[in-house]
Image (cartoon, helix red, strand yellow):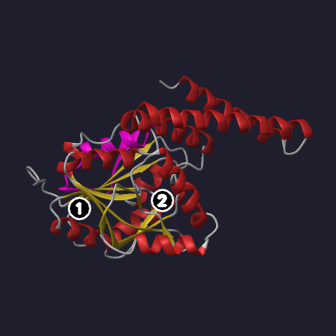
Amino acid sequence: MTDLNPAHLELSIIVVTYNSRRHVRDCLESLQRTATGIHHEVVVVDNASQDGTQDIIRNEFPKVRLIANAENQGFARSNNQGISQSQGRYILLLNPDTVVLPKALAILIKEMNQSPETGLLGCRLLNADRSLQQSFGYNVSFWNEAVRKIFFNLWENHRFPPVGWVLRSLHSSTREVAWVKGACMLSRRQALLDAKLMDEAFFLYLEDADLCRRIRQLGWQVRYTPKAEVIHFGGGSVRSNPERSALEYRRSQLHYFKKHLGEKELNILKIYLVFKMRKNILMVNFRQWVGWGAPGPLAEQKQFFRETLSLVQGFQ
């Protein structure tokens, strides 16, 4: 496969923000340092931030093109906005809660230039303490997701050494993968156009796995390289409303299973979630009955579990 009508710019960097003041300055400053010598543009799509994110961009980064949405359009749709208004041959989708380390952009572009069959490329993601973060994964399914969360959470949450050894071994070499984490992924424009950009039915979460899957189905490769490194702090745009984010994750999960995995896998997921939410509601009821916990947070938890249960039961 070859690029058709390659654009004049070598690289377009798309950053979608939502109340990202905490991280966006460091992210954009890292791009200024690492994009030197690369003919590039930076496009920030802001989803009606209320924390001064837009002011930082306008006042401190005048060369960055800001697209200011009047309301939160969601991650996939906002990335599509940025892609559609960009010109680069390569497109880097980058989270605002990241810091791009030296030479990472040049390495990613070099890897793509040397591998014309690669449609999308991910990098080595690091936590704030520079420990390794899971940067790619295997085909999404109920069982793979269960194993991934149980196993790798032992590293993310507890730094359990054996899991760290496995993670480092898996991430030690360039390889073809099922999907790469959307915090930082470099795509050929042609691969994105072939895939018709991101699926806007994903408001938040799993749009990266969906895009990678569709690109692979079109004959492109999705690859990971450990040669380029990016710090990913995580949760930069969701801390202001974690309950909404958790609900959107379940909505995206249901949509992904229906779209790609069929009725059997979807029903397994729905049965599991119904059981889990009902169990959680019973536990909150018990805690409220015995007075174990603050009334306000318990009521909020119960409301979230009820909303999730309603979402699952009503999903068609």
In this view of the protein, which residue sits in the foreground, 67 or 167? 167
The local crowd at label 2, few if under 14, some if 14 to 19, many if 20 or more residues have their Cα within 10 Å, is: many
Q: Is residue 233 above or below residue 93?
A: below
**Which image quadrant for residue 61?**
bottom left
Q: Is residue 148 above or below residue 165?
A: above
Task: Give the structural element (helix, strand or loop) at label 2.
Answer: loop
Q: Residue at x 20, y 53 (%)?
A: 220
Q: Is residue 249 magenta?
A: no
What's the amino acid at mark 1? His
| Separation of residues labelled 1 and 2 (CA atoms) | 20 Å
Give x and y (percent) for residue 208: 38, 49
Question: Which region shows up in magenta?
Answer: 64-91
Q: Is residue 63 visible?
A: no
**Which image quadrant for residue 283?**
top right
In this view of the protein, which residue sits in the foreground, 227 or 56? 227
Q: Is residue 215 above or below residue 233?
A: above
Give x and y (percent) for residue 278: 70, 33
* Label drawn at residue 191: none
Furthest-front residue in view? Answer: 264
